[in-house]
Image (spheres, helix red, strand yellow):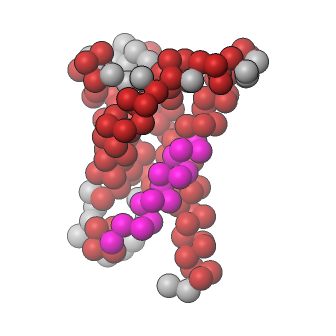
Amino acid sequence: MGDGDYSRSVGEAAVRGVLGAMAMTGLRRVTIGLGLLRKPPPEEIATEGVPRLLARIPPGKRGAAIELAHWSFGALASVGYVFLPERLLRRRASGPLYGLAIWALYVATVAPLFEADRAADRTTGDRIALALDHALYGVIIQRPTSRRE
């Protein structure tokens, strides 16, 4: 892959990551509205993990700041997907499994740092809703290819 191809695929991955995070937000609105999800992880981190940082943001802009942080993380995580081995990228399930792996990594590493998303506090509905939105994210970030297995 030439340098231009590499930059383009990283840039495209970042865009797919933002779109994937946006789609997650839409699905979360539905799952929250249906009572399946009580509080999404980005909001938990903002309100429980970094409340002093959030306090610096005007109250009317906090929701947008939380969402922009989520989209930024979605872009960054999607760029990581580009670096998976080619043989994995060709698999149909690679995107959704990557999305679920991002969630597992978050729960194991990031959430404890911010004292957010405690597994013991999650209901079955929460877990199902979060698994669905992370799998959806993975579907969206998955690069198109005609050679999938």
Image x and y of residue 68, in percent: 64, 36
Seen in the image, is 76 located left or right of residue 139? right
Where is the C terminus found, in terms of image quarters? bottom left
Q: Is residue 121 visible in the rendered structure shown here?
A: yes
The image quadrant that residue 38 belongs to is top left
Q: Is residue 96 above or below residue 44?
A: below
Residue occupying the point 50% across, 85% down: 1
Q: How many numbered circles are shown?
A: 0
Residue occupying the point 44% across, 18% down: 39
Seen in the image, is 58 located left or right of residue 63? right
Image x and y of residue 107, in percent: 34, 34
Q: Is residue 10 above or below residue 68?
A: below
Work out whether residue 32 or residue 119 is closer to the camera in this orientation and state it.
119
Q: Is residue 110 above or below residue 5?
A: above
Region rendered in magenta? 71-85
Residue occupying the point 38% across, 24% down: 117
Q: Is residue 93 magenta?
A: no
Image x and y of residue 4, in percent: 62, 81
**Main secondary structure type of the part rendered in magenta:** helix
Q: Is residue 83 magenta?
A: yes
Given the current orientation, which residue lies at the most extreme bottom position? 2
The image quadrant that residue 88 belongs to is bottom left
Residue occupying the point 61% across, 29% down: 66
Q: Is residue 19 visible in the rendered structure shown here?
A: no
Seen in the image, is 76 located left or right of residue 89? right
Work out whether residue 128 or residue 105 is closer to the camera in this orientation and state it.
105
Image x and y of residue 94, in percent: 30, 59
